[in-house]
Image (spheres, grey):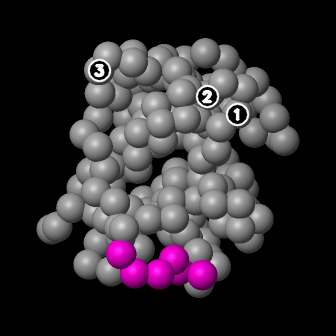
Amino acid sequence: MTDPVLREAGTTDRAAIEAIARAAYAIYLPRLGRAPAPMLQDFEAPIAACHVRIALIDEGLAGYALRFPKAGAMFIENIAVHPKWQGHGIGRCLLADAEHAARAAGLQRIALYTNEVMTESQRFYRRLGFLETDRRCEDGFDRVYLAKSLDPGETALAPPREDRGGERGG
């Protein structure tokens, strides 16, 4: 497998992003008893606002991250990797990209949330240096908030490979 190439999502990527959200979060349907928030996400506005980054493997969409600056942090509202590509470093690459963007914007941390029943995600984030900062019920979902401080003098994750050629997907 080649390293993923990252780029900003375009309008033509929307259907593939929504398909990845459905596939990646389907495992949680029995635990939650309903669709998790990412499966219900409307990606049109975030894509138009340039808040969605995608990871491509051999020109196919493997994962995405919906992120934007919020309250002094790079906030990751939603990150997903297609089950076919899980365990291949795509999520780590998307997080490295978010770290890079946060540092470039002068932000000192990355923040995100996951559902309380998504224990695999919580373990993954903790292995990458995220610490729990809060738990709360929002929109009927029990969320666990996590954050990672970014030391200006170190790079915790390898910098991402950027697609600088070609046109945006939209």
Q: Report if residue 121 is visible in the image.
A: no
Q: Secondary structure at mark 3?
A: loop
Q: Which residues are magenta?
A: 165-170
Q: Is residue 58 above or below residue 126?
A: below
Q: Earlier in the sequence, mark 3 or mark 2?
A: 2
Q: Point out which mark residue 70 bears.
A: 1
The image position of residue 23, as x and y in percent, is 50, 68
Q: Is residue 51 visible?
A: yes
Q: From the viewer's perspective, is residue 110 above or below residue 30? A: above
Quadrant in which the C terminus appears: bottom right
- Label 2 residue SS: strand
- Secondary element under disc 1, as helix, strand or loop, is strand
Q: Position of residue 123 (x, y in %)?
A: 39, 30
The amino acid type found where label 3 is placed reads Glu
Q: CA distance from mark 1 to mark 3?
A: 22 Å
Indicate which disc residue 154 carries: 3
Q: Is residue 132 above or below residue 125?
A: above
For the residues labelled 2 and 1, say whether their Cβ atoms are less than 8 Å apart.
Answer: yes
79 left or right, relative to 50: left
Label 3 to label 2: alpha-carbon separation: 17 Å
> Which residue in the protein does label 2 denote?
73
Name the kind of residue labelled 1 in the image: Lys
Structural distance between the alpha carbons of marks 2 and 1: 5 Å
Pointer 1 with pointer 3, Cβ within 8 A = no
Q: Main secondary structure of the magenta part?
A: loop
- Where the N terminus falls, by quadrant? bottom left
What residue lies at 63% left-to-right and 60% top-to-bottom? 50
